[in-house]
Image: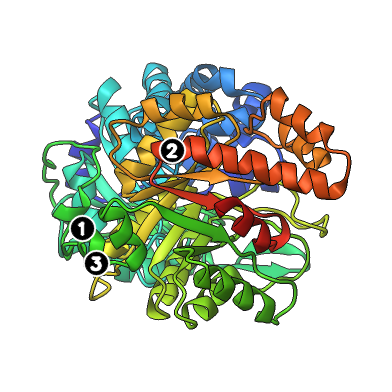
Amino acid sequence: MKPFLESLSERALVCDGAMGTMLYGKGVFINRCFESLTLTDPDMVRDVHLQYLRAGADVIETNTFGANRMKLRAFGLGNQVVEINQAAAALARAVRDAAPGGPKAYVAGAIGPLGVRVEPWGKTGVDEAEAIFREQAGALAAGGVDLFMLETFRDLNEIGAAIAAIRAVSDLPIVAQMTTEEDGNSLDGMPPEQFAPELVARGASVVGLNCSVGPAPMLETLERMAEVVSAPLSAQPNAGKPRDIEGRNLYLCSPDYMASYARRFVSAGVRLVGGCCGTTPEHIRQMAQAVKAMAPGLVHRDPGATSSAPTPIASQPHAQPPAPRAEKSAFARKLVDGRFVTIVEVPPPRGYDPTQAVEAARGLHARGVDVVTIPDGPRSGARLSALSLAVLVAGQGIEPLLQYSCRDRNLLGIQSDLLGAHALGLRNILGITGDVRTLGDIPDATAVFDIDSIGLTNVITRLNHGLDIGGQSIGPPTRFHAGVMANPSRDLDQELKRLHYKVDAGAEFVITRPVFDVAGFERFLRGVEGFRVPIIVGVWPFDNALHAEFMANEVPGVTVPDALVHRMRQANSADAAAAEGVAIARELLAALRPMAQGAQIFTVSGRVERAFEVLG
């Protein structure tokens, strides 16, 4: 057989269709690990390959879309990455080699996303992602694939890590495919005019699209890609959008309709045509007949050098210089000037009446508190949103710090919320990942995460450069003053690693979780000496002995010395316990103040009078 790219330069090739659709149709439920069937039921997988070969496919993909360590681990198969991938490659080759007339098709090693967010949107580093992809790619190469097929990626950094991983173990051709919305932009908002050249620059041999949309919108996007790259293009659309028919998701694009678009794809310069979700051997049969009746199109051009490193924000097209930090807010100016700032939490109330919360904020402001934090924590019942209360507080001439949680918000929604907050006049943002526990008094509520606080900080930094998450201009840059949380009492190495990522992402100040152990805080400070960001220490007065025991024993990542719990137990009345809690908090604040640039006073249920007592 000729090398894959040589064949591709001579004529358009046809790839196979959906593997998952076919296995599901054979009775494999979606809660099963489809990739493991290569080991447990190889005849079922072999039959799918054989059907696509008989339909006329020039390329068949291994049953390894989700066969990376991250995804296999969810099924207890994380230690079988090499075994599953090598077996899948060998199985596909065996089916191909046994075909009548000898081998006429290429075997593509299928690689899909990890299923977790990669930096800058998540805590998985690009280097970590590369290592995971390298393990899978190495096993596929050892199994004898002819090329690699990267599919259904939404994030340029993640697919860049996959390309780099493949290049570390093999010089075989790489087909790199993103998945897009109907407007042609990636699911994270990056237009094809930006991601297509980047894929070529990072080392893709063929660039294209698969999944998410049907053939009509995919054709429009490919035409845009053809204007900015000369590398071969690929297209593997779904068989339309799935429709719910009697409880089943069915794809209703007919084989002849898909074949008509296969001709249009090739006319637009596409060199590799296949199918994704919902496509079957009959779809591929008719697409192959249509494509093979057409004349050759574009000639392959060797792409440039490879690189998996994300483009620095300041170097991206449309990026603008961020506003000087001191000009972002009065709070930011105080930190730049080296002033010690005081901050107190005022939680959103139940219901929609903000009167008491706004009055509490007004009282704090009158007593000289610099900033009021509006927490976005998992509290029970129906409460006013933190963003709404922050806007109401700001309307009273009081400077709010909006705590913004990633929990239950997707990346595009987060971006919209932040732009809305800026339009409403908010400037100080404290980004947190959010709690993963069952929420409040609604036992069936669940927590959903798209990114964590590291990714959130990266979003804010991009907005401050005038860019959305897809790298497109938003007009004038936002002027957010971005802060993050840190926990001095948690595993120090892990906490410092995450904090380093947050600072690299653009964090401008840090507020700690409540600190009860002065020696532990000193160790934390030694670890952050090179970070050059203001550290604001958290202080929380105990209400009573039960509260102290709860913090010591039931709050993860909090260290409370036994001596402090003992002191709280010695109090012989509720008033004495409350006074002792304030006394301990004042002692802690006095010891911590010389080491920090501010203090945030946490209070139970918004009892701001306790904060007054601690601050004196």
Q: What secondary structure is marked by label 2?
A: strand
- Residue 194 is situated, as x and y percent measured from the top left of the image, at 22, 59
Residue beneath disc 1? 295
Residue beneath disc 3? 327
Residue 282 in sight from this viewpoint:
yes
Please name the amino acid that badge 2 sits on.
Answer: Ile
Circle number at residue 60: 2
- Residue 112 is situated, as x and y percent measured from the top left of the image, at 45, 40
Q: Nearer the viewer, mark 1 or mark 2?
A: 2
In this rendering, position of residue 316 left or right of residue 218: left
Give whichever of 111, 501 is nearer the camera: 501
In space, the residues marked 1 and 2 are separated at their CA atoms by: 22 Å
Q: Where is the N terminus found, in terms of image quarters?
A: top left
Q: Earlier in the sequence, mark 3 or mark 1?
A: 1
In space, the residues marked 3 and 1 are separated at their CA atoms by: 62 Å
Instruction: Say which residue appears at 75% left-offset and 31% top-offset.
Output: 567
Compared to residue 200, the image places residue 520 above or below, namely above
Compared to residue 263, the image places residue 316 above or below, namely above
In this rendering, position of residue 73 left or right of residue 308: right
Give whichever of 416, 508 is nearer the camera: 508
Mark 1: few, some, or many residues within 10 Å (few <14, many ≥20)?
Answer: few
- Residue 513 is situated, as x and y percent measured from the top left of the image, at 56, 42
Please name the amino acid that badge 1 sits on.
Answer: Ala
